[in-house]
Amino acid sequence: MSQSNMKFSKLTEYFEQLEGISSRLEITKILSDLFTHLNPNEIERTAYLLQGRVTPLYVKADFGMAEKMIVKGLASSFQIDSTDLEKEVKKSGDLGTTVEHFRKSINTMEEKDLSIVEAFEELEKITKTTGPGSQDLKQKMIARLVMEADPRSARYLVRIPTGVIRLGLSDMTVLDAYSWMLTGDKSLRKQIEAAYHVRPDLGYIGRQLKEKGIDGIKDVKPELFTPILMMRAERLSSGVEMIGKIGECAVEPKFDGFRLQAHYSRKKKEVQLYTRGLESMVDAYPDVVDGMLKELDVDDVIIEGEAIGYNPDSGEYLPFQLTVSRKRKHDVSEMAKTMPLRLFVFDLLYLNGKSYINEPYTERRKQIEHLVKNNKENTLVPAESDIFSDGAKIEHRFEEALSQGLEGIVAKKLDGVYQAGARG
């Protein structure tokens, strides 16, 4: 199967089919047929292109091209006025079909039938073009791509940089299609999804499955600087219900801040901070980055915690409305001084090359206590954790938490593992 050298024009035949269908099952079958015909290199890149991207979702790779800019670049190639092209786009409501229409009327000597990998690499080059004069250069690059492509390929080549690919696909549909590719049904979906929750990278998962079948993702491990989908909590209405459901448990405060997953490598002197939505917040929270670089004495680690703003004069924690004002792009260093953040660390997923996802809570907690010190001066502190086996005492702790202005409490199973992306 490694032989395939599918052309981008062939891939856009599949795109066109997908665009006309709303049934999820039909979409899954078309995708699985497409995936069956691709080699590992192609499936990895196609998984990103299906999302209108050239990287996984958590990697910033901006085309930095607005629709207007693409129109400007193409107008001269089509030998028409850019305002005329803009009018047509407004009328049709879609840049892709408009460009396809104009491309049809031009006979060009330049046409090249690029492979999927070649087209992908050309698009990737656009995202890497930066600095003075880069806007002009990007316009020329996309115009050249369109003039070298057939009309249908042109439709998708201009849609991808605007992020409006119009295929109506979710990540989950792609995971279904991976299962269909291997077995002709959805039976492997659960296993594939579990791996995706640890490495939410559709290209990587597709490549592994293509190269090694389902065994390729049997022991997917956390990877530094690849966010893991965060585990979520299930709501229960009383302490008694908690004990009934999970028995003796650890109880931690539920903070009213924002959850961060923090990745650190001593060798690279690098920190990454991800939100629940896999967005990188490393530029917004220099104080947390600084705390990690100064306070962690490990080679590499992935921890999770809740960041809360506090008043540096009184040490008082701030309400969520104020903490949330730290999510900004401007005056970042000023805000870090007047409203610093403290990260209450409550989970450990990876440490010094070892995955802790399948270790019991008690083991993960023990490591956290070695890792971060409960020191008033520190940016990273361990979240409080107490063990209870009595429902009434849990209720009392809950009331206490509310009176301290916290959101509530979280109960954790002592032998529970970290279920990425799941409710536990």
Image: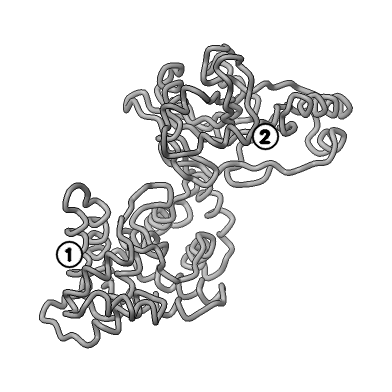
Residue 258 sits in quarter: top right
Q: Position of residue 418 (x, y in %)?
A: 61, 37
Q: Position of residue 353 (x, y in %)?
A: 43, 29
Query: 10 Å neighbourhood of mark 2: few (<14), some, or many (≥20)?
Result: some
Relative height, residue 301 to residue 45 (above, below): above
Query: 10 Å neighbourhood of mark 1: few (<14), some, or many (≥20)?
Result: some
Q: Secondary structure at mark 1?
A: helix
Q: Residue furthest left?
A: 109
Residue 306 sits in quarter: top right
Q: Which amino acid, by three-letter code, is at mark 1?
A: Lys
Q: Are marks 1 and 2 in contact (CB under 8 Å)?
A: no
Q: Which amino acid, by three-letter code, is at mark 2?
A: Gly
User: Of the residues tagged 1 and 2, which is closer to the observer?
Assistant: 1
Question: Which residue: 42% across, 62% down?
Answer: 51
Relative height, residue 7 to residue 325 (above, below): below
Left-right relation of 219 to 409: left
Residue located beneath label 2 in the image: 416
Question: Which residue: 44% across, 35% down?
Answer: 284
